[in-house]
Image (cartoon, rainbow, N blue to C red):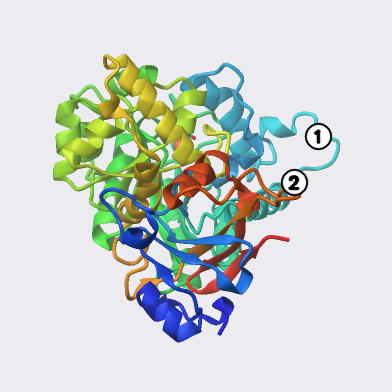
Amino acid sequence: GTIEKMDWTVGSPQDAVHKYGIDTPVVTAKDNGFFFPGFIGECFHSYWDLRNRKSLTLWTRKMANGCLQTDTHIHASQYPNVGIFGKSTLLDWLTTYTFPLESSLGNPKSPMYRNATEPPDPLARAKTVYNRVISRTLANGTTTASYYATIHLDATNLLADIAFARGQRAYIGRVCMDRPETCPEYYRDESTEQTIAHTKASIEHCRSLDVSGELLAPIITPRFAPSCLPETLSQLGALAKAEDLRVQTHISENLSEISLVKQLFPDQTTYTDVYDHHELLTPRTILAHAVHLSQDEMRLIKQRKTKISHCPASNSALGSGFCPVRVMLDEGLEVGLGTDVSGGYSTSILDAVRNACMVSRHVGYVNGGDSRYNLGVAEGLWLATVGGAKVVGMQGRLGGFEEGMLWDVQEIVLDEVDPNGERGETEVDIFGWETWEDRVEKWVWNGDDRNVRRVWVGGRLVHERQ
Ligand code: GUN
Ligand code: FE
């Protein structure tokens, strides 16, 4: 049998060998020295690919919401701006780059169309952008993504249609923003009523595509506290509670943003309290960034079982601060990784693993050079796989190879060095004397979409490298 014919659940790797005739020994951590402290067997299994003896194939189990293939925080609508942020920080980045771009996916009067020579077609633009971002994330091995779209209902529904048709596991968030002090006139909902009505309509649209909600599901998306009227936050919290829906938002990303929250919500003592007060701090809520949380805020988040999306590339690019992931893990918080396109410059969740490792060293440095803060490659991969699965509420279904889990997999290919010295196809050259752990480290630091040969979601082949 071939891998393509696998059904969408699989047992242990040993089962896969018997069921699908992969006549390879299952190389266990003990046998091959492929050793990830703390999560052997939970996250990775490796096989020698004997169908193709030239290459080492590493199978990882990635699922929506929390695997190496789980991007727990990405703005699909911001994809055209990847790499465009200049020297801005969060609040001026939003007004200079982000609101104009997002508005162009639904509003013909968007500032982006100022110099247009033809009549704007926002939905056509949305179609191009959303197809493209899904192509790029799939090519990078993202099997599950938690997406922000825009405030526009039609374009948000289009993102749902495209993600569903292409087979990526996706949570679709219609962005809510209606507070006049903080949102430009050309890009905001008119009222709480409109915000709620359009949110409900987008939820219904997602459900009409996938009743089970397993492949595609809606996620309630107040952009962040400052962008929403208090009444809107209350009604979104009530809706999340009534229908047990996922929620995503931003928290404590930037110091000026935190001051703004204090000013706009004088009755609550912390940013975390603002969400808690409006019943948005739920076990199904994903809080992006969380760079500057106090110990008390972390404890409240833990008590509520609310999840964290760590977005290291974005935090560095926008100069938001050093997110102390080790401290969060020590506190027992559930953390996954997000690219935060386009605060983050890359659609690759493998790049997020690298950035998480790098940032952790800066955190260690500013805390007296203590290597306790450093995340290893194995921990970075754990955050992107198992951690991500937990963050998106898919623990036990995604993020590993255990029996009954969904078959969300990427096939990773590394180059074996040719003794004749021919150049390999990727940046990851394997000389043959590396341990399995070395190989994985090489892949993490120098791998990219060229190493992703095929990607499956729920057993369906959704990407194949040409
Ligand atoms: N806070 C509010 N909106 C955004 C956004 O689009 N990106 C990031 N990184 N932070 C935000
Ligand atoms: Fe974001």
Q: Residue 421 shows which numbered tag?
A: 2
Residues at discs 1 and 2 in contact (Cβ within 8 Å): no
* Mark 2: secondary structure: loop
Along the line of sight, the residue nearer the viewer: 414 or 392? 414
Q: Which amino acid does the dot numbered 2 rest on?
A: Gly
Q: From the image, which quarter does the N terminus lie in?
A: bottom right
Is residue 72 shown left or right of residue 343?
left
Q: Mark 1 points at which residue?
A: 116
Residue 100 % position (x, y)? 62, 31
Q: In this view, does 97 lie to the left or right of 390?
A: right
Q: Which of 70 and 164 is in front in this view?
A: 70
Q: In terms of image quadrants, where is residue 178?
A: top left
Q: Inspect this view and state whether residue 88 appears.
A: yes
- Circle 1: residue type: Ala
Is residue 20 placed above or below 458 in the rendered structure?
below
Name the spot of residue 251 as percent of width and height, x first. 33, 33
| Vertical placement of residue 85 versus 68, above or below | above
Q: Residue at x 43, y 78 (%)?
A: 16
Q: Distance between the residues labelled 1 and 2?
A: 51 Å
Residue 321 percent across, percent down from the top left: 39, 21
- Figure quadrant of the C terminus: bottom right
Tell me which residue sits at (54%, 23%) in the image: 93
Q: Is residue 53 above or below residue 184?
A: below
Q: Which of marks 1 and 2 is in front?
A: 2
